[in-house]
Image (cartoon, rainbow, N blue to C red):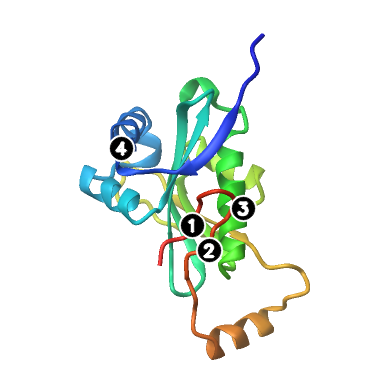
Amino acid sequence: MPATYRTIRTATPSDLKYLVHLQKRWSNDVGFLPRQALLDYLERRGALIITQNAEPCGYLLFRPSKRGIVRIPQVAIDPELLRSTAGTCLLSKLKHAATANGCFALRALSRTDTLAHLFFPAIGFTATAVLPAPSKRHMPVIEWTHSLLTPAITAQAMLRTLRTAEPTHAATAIGADVRLPA
């Protein structure tokens, strides 16, 4: 059996075709973003691509807020590689980048009838809110949060830091090329 090599890199506009393809495959689970919105994430360096043996096999879109929370609108993995830790690897890379850039939480949304509803709690996210279904034919949406704070940092210290410090989102290299956009 040949060795499997995985790498994670910042997505570029040349990856748009792959993102559109995988988004279409998982549109019922991850939702739909227009091509222009996907291109915006790519141009702002707000997307990670995981490759296996040099072929893309998944992506993660993210956008940090000025409040230190990194929002994750979409995570999609090739259907053949589900449960292969590809999604966990993407989120691990994002956690390290977010922590290094002073962010204190990751946030994602998922409907209760999707695989993400099982994935997020399995990797340490906790449900922080239940949003009502937008219509009778839709399912409720769960807001998932993963704290990046160490146990030594209390909520009071965090609030004091947020009140007194200007948020800094200067791009700092993590690994070879992962940076949080300004």
Residue 147 visible, this angle: yes
Label 2 sits on a secondary structure element that is loop
**CA distance for labels 1 and 4:** 18 Å
Point out which mark residue 125 bears: 3
Question: Label 3 near label 2: C-beta < 8 Å?
Answer: no
Identify which residue is drawn at 37% across, 51% down.
133
User: Mark 2 = which residue?
Assistant: 172
Please report the residue visible at 58 percent of the width from the left and 30 percent of the height from the top: 6
Nearest to the observer: residue 135 or residue 41: 41
Q: Can residue 77 be seen in this view?
A: no
Secondary structure of the residue carrying tag 1 is loop
Q: Against 160, is 95 above or below?
A: above
Q: Mark 4 points at which residue?
A: 14
Which badge, 1 or 4, is on the more N-terminal residue?
4
The amino acid type found where label 3 is placed reads Phe
For badge 4, the amino acid type reads Ser
Earlier along the polypeptide chain: callout 2 or callout 3?
3
Q: Earlier in the sequence, mark 4 or mark 2?
A: 4
Q: Do the residues labelled 1 and 3 touch (CB within 8 Å)?
A: no
